[in-house]
């Protein structure tokens, strides 16, 4: 519709200008009007059709906004596959993480991605899971974060089954650290406080110091945070450097357990490791 509208308006503007010039030339030749009058009429016609043409761009903007709203409401209306049970309780702040005989198959496949997996991680312990692609490392990390529920077996933190935990306490205690992070427009402090809005400046500085970014950010005009998060990395999202920022967010979160996937060498395409630390 916008294409036809813009074309018709453009054609009408050209035709109106041509008719104005033709009629104005004839009137000037007869001595009825001056050349200045014809020029004024042509300029007024241009001023008339220019805002009408801009309505086409406004229509495109409205259409784009409508499509974005449709997608947003579709996400908001989506029912979660893993929901909170009635009578759910909060997870303890600390405790051992236990994966007990877990078997899991993705809904689209019949072959289990994990079969009878058992793993015990003590409070404060850090482990790495290394293996070839398809071994189930990412699947185990997703199950620990309860992005899926196991088909058989149980996963518990501090002796409490994750399926019996409230979603709020589950997300506070167990955090997934993505391999690539996204930096929103704003200061580094704003980006880090997405994990915990009440974090003070001292906590932010400690988190930046852990990834070696404290000196870089402190060279800005406003002390420890540059004017924008993208200014520290050159652009809003950089695949080479943005992977450093999810780590500080998880540490500010004060979680009990964090899972992270990471390449350990250039030869291994998919080398991932799970990290767990006490708050």
Image (cartoon, rainbow, N blue to C red):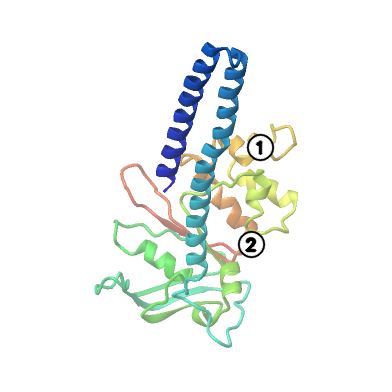
Is residue 275 visible in the rendered image? The answer is no
Q: Which residue is drawn at 68% across and 37% down?
A: 226
Q: Quadrant of the C terminus?
A: bottom right
Neighbour tally class for label 2: few under 14, some 14-19, many 20 plus, Cα within 10 Å: some
Whole-percent x, y for residue 32 in the image: 59, 16
Looking at the rendered structure, the secondary structure element under dot 1 is helix
Which residue corresponds to the image point at 46% horizontal and 34% vertical from the top-left? 12
Give residue 265's mark. Answer: none
Q: Callout 2: helix, strand or loop?
A: loop
Q: In x, y percent, where is residue 41? A: 59, 24
| The label number, if any, that marks residue 217 in the structure image | 1
Q: Which residue is rendered at x = 53% and y = 80% of the image? A: 84
Q: Residue 58 lies in what quarter of the image?
A: top right
> How far is the residue under mark 1 from the one under mark 2?
22 Å
Location of residue 108 (image quadrant) = bottom left
Q: Which mark is residue 254?
A: 2
Q: Residue at x 48, y 31 (%)?
A: 13
Side of 129 relative to 165 (left or right): left
Mark earlier in primary sequence (1, 2): 1
- Kindly tell me whether residue 85 is visible in this rendering: yes
Q: Where is residue 242 in the image (x, y as percent from the top left)?
A: 51, 44
| Total residue callouts | 2
Closer to viewer: mark 1 or mark 2: 1
Q: Nearer the viewer, residue 111 or 48?
A: 48
Q: Is residue 196 above or below residue 113?
A: above
């Amino acid at each position: 519709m916008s294409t036809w509208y813009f074309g018709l308006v453009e054609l009408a503007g050209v035709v109106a200008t041509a008719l104005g010039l033709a009629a104005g030339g004839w009137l000037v030749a007869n001595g009825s009007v001056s050349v200045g009058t014809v020029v004024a009429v042509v300029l007024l016609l241009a001023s008339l059709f220019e805002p009408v043409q801009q309505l086409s761009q406004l229509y495109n903007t409205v259409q784009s906004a409508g499509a974005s709203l449709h997608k947003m409401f579709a996400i908001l209306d989506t029912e979660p596959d893993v929901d909170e049970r009635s009578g759910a309780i909060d997870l303890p702040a600390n405790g051992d993480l236990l994966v007990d005989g877990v078997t899991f198959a993705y809904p689209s496949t019949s072959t289990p991605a994990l079969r009878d997996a058992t793993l015990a991680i003590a409070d404060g312990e850090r482990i790495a899971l290394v293996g070839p692609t398809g071994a189930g490392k990412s699947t185990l990390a997703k199950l620990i974060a309860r992005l899926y529920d196991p088909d058989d077996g149980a996963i518990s933190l501090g002796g409490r089954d994750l399926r019996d935990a409230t979603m709020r306490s589950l997300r506070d205690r167990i955090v997934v650290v993505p391999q690539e992070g996204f930096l929103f427009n704003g200061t580094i402090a704003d980006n880090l406080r997405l994990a915990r809005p009440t974090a003070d400046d001292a906590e932010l500085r400690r988190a930046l110091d852990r990834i070696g970014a404290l000196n870089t950010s402190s060279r800005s005009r406003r002390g420890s945070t540059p004017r924008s998060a993208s200014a520290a990395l050159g652009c809003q999202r950089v695949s080479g450097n943005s992977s450093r920022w999810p780590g500080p967010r998880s540490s500010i979160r004060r979680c009990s357990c964090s899972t992270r996937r990471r390449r350990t060498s250039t030869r291994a395409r998919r080398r991932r490791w799970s990290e767990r630390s006490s708050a």
